[in-house]
Image (cartoon, rainbow, N blue to C red):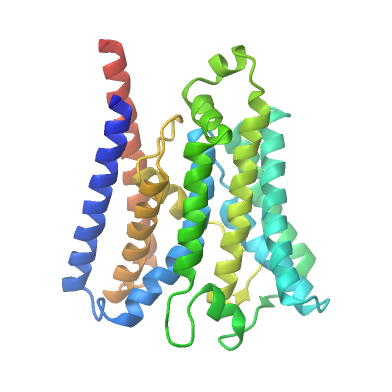
Amino acid sequence: MPDFIKKIQLQKILAFAALIILYIFFAFMGRNFTNQATTLNILAQSYFVGFMALGVTFVIITGGIDLSIGASMMCSALVGGLLLNNYGWPLWLCLVMVVAFGTLVGLINGLLVTKLKLPPFIATLGMMMVTLGFGAIITRSSSMRYPTHTGWFRSVFIRTDNNFPSGVIFLAVFFILALILLNKTKIGRYIFAIGSNEEAVRLSGVNVSRWKCSAYVICGFFTGMSAIFYAAMFTTMIPNTGNGFELQAIAAVVIGGTSLAGGVGSLTGTIIGVFIMSVLRSGLVSMNLPPPYQTFFTGLVVIGAVLLDIYRTKKANEVKKIK
């Protein structure tokens, strides 16, 4: 078994152990943390961050980054809400447009990076600001509402009336589809290859721009899916919000073993990282910490995740030099 695969497996084991330890800690230190309501809330918060994290994993494996997914998720939800509230479109068609808009933003990001040769950080940071502004412009800075707790929308995407977490099924199905796409198809193989050595892939005659752009499109699709679950959970979409969620998704990806340097990644690890972030948020709430403290500790986790990735990359480079 290659060394990098062993390291990924070890990272997944360590991440899962961290998840268990974190849950046990909050079970003792938090208030009502182990009851059904908190468990359902942990699952519900995992849905929209989970879809973003699955999508951005593809981008990070290429060695890129997408800072626009949080703002794009909110803007996609605002587009659907505008069509629903102001133009009377049927809900199912609005949801299709939500995913389509998210995918479009992903395509634009991909073209900016591959065709205009913008650094991914700059391109997606710019799109973050564009989507923030666009959402406010089209809604005239007015909030958009989706169907409330009654009706099929929340029952299908979050949980049913008898509290069955229906969103878990969607997350599991799309996780399996993403797993197949990344590990069993040509797209996945080229995404890994580009992240490992883009120049070598280009010299071998592969259209690098095409496959790298596809990673951003996939990320955009999952961002659109994330917007549906966010809308189902919170129902009210507020313009000029959404930025910040991308850090939770990226932190989940890095915690799960995907390297910001590219070429190494695990969707299974990403899902574990998503639940770590969700347990952390719910656990901090159960300890009655004010929102600023929750933001503070979440930021520490993000910093820790990046430092962990730097350490892993440094060790991997040391091994290469020795060989």
Determine if residue 28 is in view.
yes
Q: Quadrant of the N terminus?
A: top left
Q: Examine the image and state in which quarter residue 25 appears.
A: bottom left
Q: Residue at x 51, y 48 (%)?
A: 178
Can you name the residue that lies furthest to the left here?
A: 28
Task: List x then y, in percent, for residue 252.
Answer: 40, 51
Q: Residue at x 41, y 37 (%)?
A: 265
Can you name the residue that lies furthest to the right here?
A: 87
* Image vertical order of residue 81 relative to residue 184, above or below: below
Q: Quadrant of the C terminus?
A: top left
Task: List x then y, in percent, for residue 296.
Answer: 35, 59
Q: How many marks?
A: 0
Q: Residue at x 48, y 61 (%)?
A: 171
Q: Please state if 110 lies on the left or on the right of 4 as rendered.
A: right
Task: List x then y, in percent, for residue 175.
Answer: 47, 54
Q: Residue at x 67, y 55 (%)?
A: 102
